[in-house]
Image: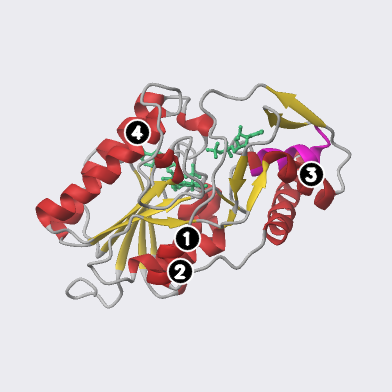
Amino acid sequence: MARKGYGRRRVLVTGGAGFLGSHLIDRLIERGDEVLCVDNLFTGQKQNLDHLHGNPAFEFIRHDVTFPLYVEVDEIYNLACPASPVHYQHDPVQTTKTSVLGAINMLGLAKRLRCKIFQASTSEVYGDPTVHPQREEYWGNVNPVGVRSCYDEGKRCAETLFFDYRRQHDLPVKVARIFNTYGPRMHPSDGRVVSNFVMQALKGEPITIYGDGSQTRSFCYYSDLIDGFLRLMDTPDDFTGPVNLGNPSEFTIRELAEQVIALTGSKSKIHSLPLPQDDPKQRQPNIELARRELGWEPQVALNEGLRHTIAYFDKQMSEEGLAEAAI
Ligand code: NAD
Ligand code: UDP
């Protein structure tokens, strides 16, 4: 569906200058949509969108989603929110506002336009899970007053709002619970584990493992995840989720460090640092629902995704080195 008088579907992507948002925008434009990207550039990078400048199908507005937004679109993907613990803990009050007020503002917009709206939720709604792997029916084990709560509880409240708008206003909503995803266009000093380890290995610096490295995560390559987003958005209105999207292959953080060292051929040594408060001990998605309802399954193995990610950061570093040398 497109607005009256317009041939192409016009899609709003909040958080579109970030890692996932910029890849989503590329896929939407490739398939023929027009995209309006809204971002306050807190963790996003303009360079993630450089290749789109001058493209008539693309428009950028610098805007904070905690304030209302009045635009005309056919669909909304709500991704605005810092995703790295370092960044979401930097200004925790703003993080909760971004999730909660951002959801209220974007849901209000969707209600006025009667359009479909997608929420980038997270595996963090399960907290430090006591059920493993995590299914959508699990209600989670979240500390409401810890350092991660601004993100975890903010995202949980956003889910509540999405389902209340569904029940109260019959709004078509789609909620994806995203598990750790990595790839090109993560910010090099983003603070998340994959970008940290890859940058440290490429620079020959110590690889910082927090705790003993026995905690686990399941790493999904960005292209698989974006494919899941598009499939979820195309499901009939009666399928709302929440649906887990992630790669079920689970690794310890130490195994991740070893893979990064092997793939980069780095001489970096492992350096242990204290485990941050409330760091989840294990995380693995059960993706039966996504398999059944979306026909979706990740295709990219960790070593393959890491190779592409390493090549991206390596290229970034040499381009920056060349730019510095030219000054
Ligand atoms: P990111 O930090 O690269 O992107 C987030 C984007 O949102 C950035 O461009 C940032 O500038 C923007 N933003 C932040 N606050 C904003 C505000 N108030 N108004 C407007 N823009 C704002 O992170 P990402 O990995 O691309 O994550 C995108 C979304 O997916 C987030 O909502 C995140 O919670 C969710 N998610 C990501 C992962 C993952 O592993 N990448 C896992 C779970 C959930
Ligand atoms: N981690 C680590 N070293 C780093 C960054 C992260 O050992 O330099 C660990 C972190 O403690 C957590 C896991 O890696 O157990 C994933 O951290 P990340 O910040 O990527 O995301 P999370 O899944 O914790 O939100």
Query: Which residue is label 3 attached to?
Result: 258
Disc 4/disc 3 C-alpha distance (Å): 33 Å
Magenta-highlighted stretch: main secondary structure?
helix
Residue 76 higher or lower than 295, as above or below: above
- Sequence-earlier tag: 3 or 2: 3
Q: Work out whether residue 15 or residue 191 is closer to the camera in this orientation and state it.
A: 191
Q: Give the range drawn in magenta.
A: 194-205
> Left or right: where does residue 55 sit relative to residue 279?
left
- Sequence-earlier tag: 4 or 2: 4
Query: Mark 1 is on which residue type?
Result: Ile
The local secondary structure at tag 2 comes to helix
Q: Which residue is drawn at 35% across and 67% down?
A: 34
Q: Do the residues labelled 2 and 1 touch (CB within 8 Å)?
A: yes
Q: Which quarter of the rendered image does ligand 1 occupy?
A: top left
Query: Mark 3 is on which residue type?
Result: Glu
Between circles 4 and 2, the one closer to the viewer is: 2
- Sequence-earlier tag: 1 or 3: 3
Q: Work out whether residue 272 or residue 30 is closer to the camera in this orientation and state it.
A: 272
Query: Which residue is label 1 attached to?
Result: 287
Quadrant occupied by the C terminus: top right
